[in-house]
Image (spheres, grey):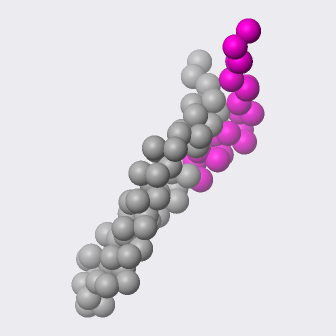
Amino acid sequence: MTDYAQLAQSLKDNEAFQRALDIVKSGALEALCTIDHDDAKGILKLQATIGVVNDIRDNLDAFVRQGAPKPKPGIA
């Protein structure tokens, strides 16, 4: 059985993964500030991108809460 809590915690602790999510979200937010207000399709795409990043983080949090991941073993 897969330990989703531990995998989720690993992704939450992964600086490169979190940075990638930050870059995607901030890029979409910046683009929303400059996009033509008549470009409904573009606005929806950017909003969806932001929503996906938020959903990924929410799901990781939920996996961690549901499974209470075990601490990583240290060096003996």
> Residue at 71% across / 30% down in the picture?
69
> Residue at 58% across / 34% down in the picture?
10
Instruction: Residue at the far front: name it.
Output: 75
> Residue at 36% across / 67% down in the picture?
27
Instruction: Residue at the far top: name it.
Output: 76
Q: Is residue 1 above or below residue 13?
A: above
Left or right of 66: which side holds 43?
left
> Residue at 41% across / 74% down in the picture?
29
Q: Position of residue 63 (x, y in %)?
A: 64, 40
Asked whether 25 or 63 is in front, the reply is: 25
The total of numbered circles placed on residues is 0
Can residue 48 be spotted in the picture? no
Q: Quadrant of the N terminus?
A: top right
Q: Is residue 56 above or below residue 40?
A: above
Q: Position of residue 65 (x, y in %)?
A: 72, 42
**4 falls in the magenta region:** no
**63 falls in the magenta region:** yes
Q: Position of residue 25 (x, y in %)?
A: 43, 64
Q: Is residue 55 above or below residue 1?
A: below
Asked whether 12 or 76 is in front, the reply is: 76
Q: Quadrant of the C terminus?
A: top right
Q: Which residues are magenta?
A: 58-76
Left or right of 1: which side holds 28?
left
Q: Is residue 17 above or below residue 75?
A: below
Q: Position of residue 66 (x, y in %)?
A: 71, 38
Can residue 64 be spotted in the picture? yes
